[in-house]
Amino acid sequence: MKLITHNMLTSKCMKGVKQGYPLAIEARDVKIVDVEFKSDFVARVLPRMDWNTLWAAADSLVNILQIGHVGDLPKSLIENYESNEEFLKKVHHVLMEVEVIEGDLICPESGRRFPISSGIPNMILNEDEV
């Protein structure tokens, strides 16, 4: 699961859950996968991202990757990012190249765990959760 996907997932459809966002990530296996950099794509997608959620997700993976903060993202979105190629490359790395292979997504309200297996999050709810 790429962090661009994580940024859009919610458990809001669960019974009793009002927001269900952001889901915490508990990763057991994370890989870095090379993806061609496209600055226009990153610049267009950034306004749709929740920056705080992206930053926290990247930060939560530091220990498993055994490196500094993933991509060295600043804690807040910089101004005029559209014209800052170095910044866009860092965001691209975090959004598109960091991939959670195995782990869980955890609902912040219910604590319900959604497994990630082979890079695919399973967000299917049980009948009694709808």
Image (spheres, rainbow, N blue to C red):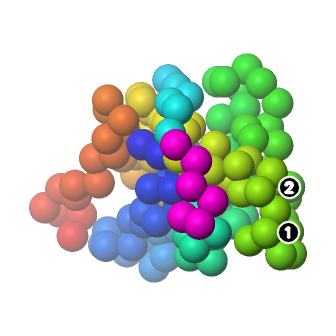
- Label 2's element? loop
Look at 32% across and 69% down and name the residue there: 14
Residue at image mark 2 = 74
Tell me residue 22's x, y (percent).
56, 63
- Label 1's element? loop
Residue 110: tell me if it is visible.
Answer: no
Q: If the image is split into quadrants, where does the N terminus sit?
A: top left
Residue 97: tell me if it is visible.
Answer: yes
Residue at image mark 1 = 78
Look at 82% across and 43% down and name the residue there: 72
Left or right of 76 on screen, residue 92: left
For the residues labelled 2 and 1, say whether their Cβ atoms are less than 8 Å apart: yes
For marks 2 and 1, give the CA distance: 8 Å
The residue nearer to you, when weighing 5 against 42, is: 42
Look at 79% across and 69% down and name the residue there: 83
The residue nearer to you, when weighing 122 against 99, is: 99
Look at 85% across and 58% down and name the residue there: 75
Q: Amino acid at mark 1?
A: Ile
Q: Quadrant of residue 39?
A: bottom right
Q: If the image is split into quadrants, where does the C terminus sit?
A: bottom left
Give, as a single range, the part of the protein colored magenta.
36-41
Residue count near mark 2 (Cα–Cα under 10 Å), binned few <14, some 14–19, many ≥20: few
